[in-house]
Image: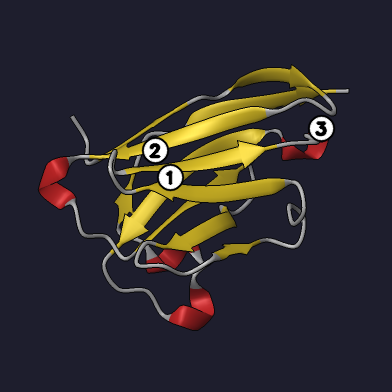
Amino acid sequence: QGELVASGGGSVQAGGSLRLSCAVSRLTYGFTYMGWFRQVSGKEREGVAVIYTRGGSGSYADSVKGRFTISLDSTRNTVYLQMNSLKPEDTAIYYCAADFSVESSRVLDSREYNYWGQGTQVTVSS
């Protein structure tokens, strides 16, 4: 089993909500940054939301601000992405990622992360 296990994708209509979960295995507990990225076929992977696990607030892509919320449950070693007011353009494969050291000015840059979970498909229909 991988170090990061993502779940919660699915299909919804525009305006609906989904919650993604990313569970961290005990062996790799201690990541300082965890977040969600998404990718559409033929496009680069883009950062959606990232959280500093030691007490910071989340950082969000402009396209999801006000609609998505990232949160951390330290007792369960799990990061959540609550997605509300979903739009068809949110359709993508969503990946969770984590690392121990990330340049603070590049927290939404996928190249900063070395630990990745499997993708989970999110489909939003109009």
What residue is drawn where x is 22% and y is 41%? 3
Horizontal placement of 39 versus 33: left or right?
right
Above or below 53: residue 19: above
Name the mark on residue 88. 3
> Could you tell me which quadrant the N terminus lies in?
top left
Mark 1, residue position: 96
What residue is drawn where x is 56% and y is 34%? 93
Q: Amino acid at mark 3?
A: Pro
What residue is drawn where x is 56% and y is 52%? 45
User: SS class of the residue under badge 2?
Assistant: strand
Between residue 123 and residue 41, name the one nearer to us: 123
Horizontal placement of 73 versus 75: left or right?
right
What residue is drawn where x is 64% and y is 44%? 42
Instruction: Measure the C-alpha gap from mark 1 to mark 3.
Output: 20 Å
Callouts 2 and 3 close, C-beta under 8 Å: no
User: SS class of the residue under badge 3?
Assistant: helix
Furthest toward the left, the residue is 27
Name the mark on residue 22. 2
